[in-house]
Image (cartoon, rainbow, N blue to C red):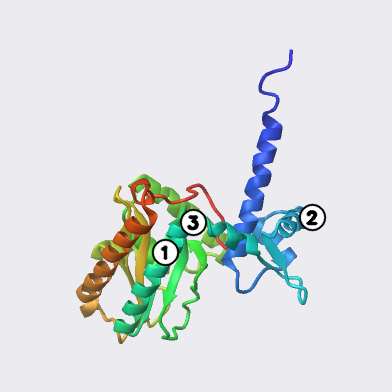
Amino acid sequence: MRSSRSPQPSLSHGTQSIERALRILRELAARGEFGWRLSDLAARCEVDKGTVHRVLSCLVRERFVQQRSTDKHYFPGPMLYELGLSLPGYAAFQQACERRMAKLAAQTEAIAWLILRSGNEYVCAVRQGSLELRGLMVHAGTRRPLFTSVGGVAILQTLPSLETENILADNMQQEIAQRGSGRLDALEKMRERSRRHGFGVNLGDVVTGVHAFAVPVCADNGRAMAAVCLTGLAEQFGEPKLAEVRAALGEVAAAVEQDARECLGGVMHMGHTGHTGASAEP
């Protein structure tokens, strides 16, 4: 007699296909400015080129992906934007945050940015300010492991210890796989400094001469859904200014929390974080 569980392999296979397609979309979205070559994208996703090409062909037909004719690089497609139009609250929230980050950047003559938690990673939602900083390769849409950013560290400080440990284990695995172990000591130094001060603090720990700070933006359950960050030069933000910087960031974060309540409604009650399993850094 055939087992009632026999359909499971095909169901599992179908789920894996969906997860593979979503991973490819995340990678494409994370490099929206530069795009991906097929071979590089396949290596990044650890999937064979033939499979990635078939997935991309389907996504191109459905306009989730587009391919540039000049160099054959793949980019996010217009369907992603069109689907996003069904979330007007998020557009309103981003516009409000853009105004707040622009004001903070002008007041401090630094770079102000807002990152959103996305599972084990963060995605940059807003970046404002014209200060040129060596090593700050974060723009709207950038997606990276939480522990690589002072804002991600501020987010981690609001989470239960076991969840934090699991995220750090995943983040370290990503870091080693993609960049080696060379930055691990610097990233640990940033986390330890932030732990001592009670908010995100990076005093040149990762890039010499670049200081960065962050406070969480929390949902109604107390867990961070985002972080407000400020990045500038060491001569602008020395250690004696920590209290002043924290107060300024806290004021903006409180305003952003209110914007989220008004624009996102129930998301503030759920403390939405997106996918919480192991995920791929772009």
The one nearer the camera, 42 or 102, is: 102
Check the picture and name the quadrant holding the N terminus: top right
The one nearer the camera, 150 or 250, is: 250
Residue occupied by mark 1: 92
Residue type at mark 1: give it. Answer: Ala
Residue type at mark 2: give it. Answer: Gly
Q: Secondary structure at mark 3?
A: loop
- Picture quadrant where residue 244 is located: bottom left
Bin the neighbour count of mark 2 within 10 Å (Cα to Cα): few under 14, some 14-19, many 20 and up: few
The one nearer the camera, 268 or 41, is: 268
Task: Classify 167 as above or below 112.
Answer: above
Q: In the rendered view, does 76 fall on the left or right side of 2? A: left
- At which x and y percent is residue 207? 43, 77
Q: Secondary structure at mark 2?
A: helix
Bin the neighbour count of mark 3 within 10 Å (Cα to Cα): few under 14, some 14-19, many 20 and up: few
Bin the neighbour count of mark 1 within 10 Å (Cα to Cα): few under 14, some 14-19, many 20 and up: some
- At which x and y percent is residue 186? 41, 69
The one nearer the camera, 149 or 253, is: 253
The circle drawn on residue 50 is 2
Check the picture and name the quadrant holding the C terminus: bottom right
- At which x and y percent is residue 16? 66, 43
Q: Mark 3 to mark 2: distance in Å?
A: 34 Å
